[in-house]
Image (spheres, rainbow, N blue to C red):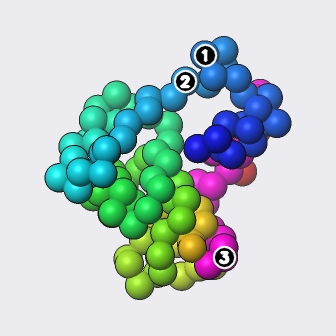
Amino acid sequence: MGTLLVALREFGYTEGKNITFAWQSSGGQAERFGPLPEDLTRVRVDVIVAPDNPAVAAARKATRTIPIVMVLAQDPVSSGFGASLARSGGNVTGLSASDRPIHSASRGRASAPPGGSTP
């Protein structure tokens, strides 16, 4: 997540000033994957960053409207996270483990500079 924070700073975001994070971790306990994204949907976060397939699957089960950014998902199309790498057809975007981007209409929400517009 350090790389994410660096990139956000480059776009003018500073934690505690113009962006807030609700950090949650399963602590390696698979049984916590269900409740974590459900908690995030209750507090109405703007985006969920999911590091791997189990986290993406749990987030996708919890919401079809909040954008989900996957960090290193394995084979996202076969895993059901998107219709294709070119067009996900849903609320999941990000990178697969093969470094091929999976695009979504919601991807601009996570990359717009403060005060900027989104597509």
Q: Nearer the viewer, residue 9 or 113?
A: 9
* Image coordinates for residue 72, horizontal then vertical, percent: 54, 65
| Three-letter code for the amino acid on which mark 3 is drawn | Arg
Q: Is residue 89 visible?
A: no
Point 44% across, 29% down: residue: 22
Q: What is the spatial separation of the Cα atoms under label 2 and label 1, in whole angstroms? A: 6 Å
From this viewpoint, which residue is outermost toward the top?
Answer: 17
Identity of the residue drawn at 62% across and 78% down: 98
Can the viewer see residue 94 in this picture? Answer: yes
Image location (x, y in percent) of residue 13: 72, 28
SS at circle 2: loop
C-alpha distance separating marks 3 and 1: 32 Å
What residue is shown at x 33% (from left), y 63% (from top)?
54
Give the residue drawn at x 23%, y 56%.
30
- Residue kind at label 2, given as amino acid type: Thr
Q: CA distance from mark 2 to mark 3?
A: 28 Å
According to the picture, the residue beneath numbered tag 2 turns out to be 20
Q: Which residue is mark 3?
A: 100
- Helix, strand or loop at disc 3? loop
Image quadrant of residue 117? Answer: top right
Q: Nearer the viewer, residue 107 or 30?
A: 30
| Residue at image mark 1 | 16
The image shows residue 36 at horizontal and vertical percentages of 28, 42
Q: Is residue 63 left or right of residue 87?
A: left
Image quadrant holding the N terminus, namely: top right
